[in-house]
Amino acid sequence: MSISRRVLFVAPLAALGGCVSSGLPRMGGLFESRPSRTARTLARPDYRLVYGAWPGEEFPIRAFDHAGVDPAFLRQEVAYRGPEAPGTIVVDPAAHHLYFVEAPGRATRYGVGVGREGFGWNGRAKVAMRRAWPDWVPPREMVARDPAIRQQLVMTSRGLGVPGGPRSPLGARALYLAANGADSGYRIHGTIEPHTIGTNVSSGCIRMVDQDAIHLYGRASEGTPVVVLA
């Protein structure tokens, strides 16, 4: 597994613990084929149901106002022409799409927010850990870039951060990505800012509407391969 990144900021791997670009070695990573940005839609769920408020969670999940969102960023089943095998997560940052390959020729596609300028990355990784309502523990480098973060931090089981819940930037679910046998520092996770889906906004993490993050979480077990296109 390898990760290549186009980042201006490089931090020691040991300092990572949140949505921030890491200092993994620059390796390989250009993929010649990518899913079509105009992939044919095969099926759409009832968005009033899937993006409504969700009961039964540890913390409340508010309804997502999907009516004001570009339909291309709403969950749907699409024809998939990429080379990756079923059970693979494929992220196309340029299109702000994440695919979970369900079967040959078919994938569930979600809209995502991706790394802002200077924090893009691409390559292969795998899901090393999965957490529901995870604590967010930002690296020191992230706090140094934005000192206002300090006001939000309290002691958690993993250090100074924001406890899992409605205030955590990781939202309702998080998939922790590893590459080269180590934590990459990158996550696929929910968000408390669903309006940022379809934009370049993060420090390298892939963010999803909470309802979509929960849906993907139910499909992607530990060990799931992840491909982020160049």
Image (cartoon, helix red, strand yellow):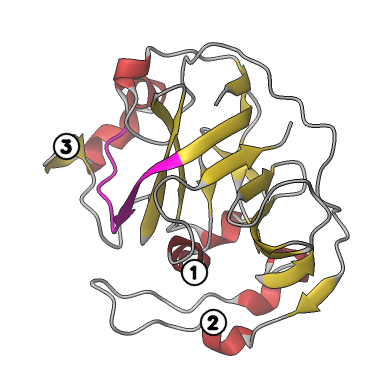
Q: Residue at x 38, y 50 (%)?
A: 169
Q: Earlier in the sequence, mark 3 or mark 1?
A: 3
Is residue 68 left or right of 20 when viewed as pictured?
right
Find residue 1 and report its image quarter.
Answer: top right
Residue kind at label 1, given as amino acid type: His
Q: Earlier in the sequence, mark 1 or mark 2?
A: 2
Q: Which residue is mark 2?
A: 50
Q: Earlier in the sequence, mark 2 or mark 3?
A: 2
Q: Is residue 112 above or below residue 22?
A: below
Q: Residue at x 59, y 32 (%)?
A: 124
- Look at the image and tell me in which quarter the C terminus lies: top right
Find the magenta span and give its range.
127-138
Q: Residues within 10 Å of mark 1 (few under 14, many from 20)?
A: some
Camera sees residue 171? no
Q: Secondary structure at mark 3?
A: loop
The mark closer to the camera, 1 or 2, is 1
Q: Which residue is mark 1?
A: 215
Q: Residue at x 72, y 72 (%)?
A: 77
Q: Is residue 173 magenta?
A: no
Looking at the picture, how far across and down is residue 108, in whole percent?
Answer: 66, 66
Looking at the picture, how far across and down is residue 103, in whole percent?
Answer: 69, 64
Q: Which residue is mark 3?
A: 158
Q: Is residue 133 magenta?
A: yes
Q: Residues within 10 Å of mark 2 (few under 14, many from 20)?
A: some
